[in-house]
Image (cartoon, grey):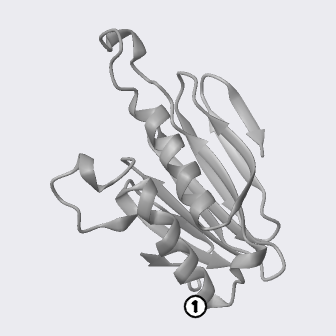
Amino acid sequence: MIEADQTTEIRVKVAECAVGRNEQTLITIGLGSCVAIVLYDSRARIGGLAHTLLPDESMARDRSNPAKFAASAVTVLLAEMARLGADARRVRAKLVGGASMFANLLPSGGINIGERNVAAARQALERSGIHIVAEDVGSDHGRSVYFHLDDGRVEVRSLKKGNRVI
């Protein structure tokens, strides 16, 4: 867990999560099949971002890092955000990523890890009672996320599809 204290931009790498507040920006680069789970309490201006790699622990040998898995990252983010003063009843979510980057290489009926990551993130949010207010998921292109904690704006940048705000 990275806690953004004074730094204005915090880079969140694969299988990491970070929380911050106010004028900070949480950034994750290069989402393919991975999913960025973005949580925000607009009143407290506290947010969290997890760059999840896999749907759940059953798909990995090393299960020690809850930020790696969509199924467990939500719980970690909510706990860290609460420690900073966020109220889970006000937290809303946005999801980005979950692409099928190499769909043409999958055998017929093969596992699409991007779709599974998105489904696992949605289930984890539902279990925690967190509403999803925006998504930019699926398709076949990579994305990067710039999450601005001053206003909750999430910039999604993609070489293939351009930039958009969700």
> Relative to the observer, which residue lies in front, 69 or 51?
69
Q: Nearer the viewer, residue 166 or 28?
A: 166
Residue 97 in percent (x, y) is at 55, 39
In the picture, the quarter occupied by the N terminus is bottom left
Q: Is residue 135 left or right of residue 96?
A: right
Residue 82 visible in image: yes
Query: Which residue lies at the image location 61% right of the left edge and 32% below the top edge?
Result: 158
Q: Nearer the viewer, residue 130 or 92?
A: 130
Q: Quadrant of residue 61?
A: bottom left
**Residue type for callout 1:** Arg
Would residue 32 be visible to someone looking at this image? no
Q: 98 or 146, which is in the foreground? A: 98
Label 1 Cα neighbours within 10 Å, binned few <14 / some 14-19 / many ≥20? few
Q: Is residue 78 left or right of residue 56?
A: right
x 60%, y 59%: residue: 125
The x, y position of residue 34, in whole percent, is 44, 43
Q: Which residue sits at x=39%, y=33%?
A: 113
Residue 46 vs 52, above or below: the answer is below
- Provide the residue designation for mark 1: 83
Question: Residue shown at 67%/38% (left/top)?
Answer: 136
Q: Position of residue 51 (x, y in %)?
A: 46, 55
* Picture coordinates of residue 11, whole percent (x, y): 49, 62
Label 1: state its secondary structure.
helix
Q: In the image, is residue 61 above or below residue 49?
A: above
- The vertical placement of 5 against 60, above or below, is below
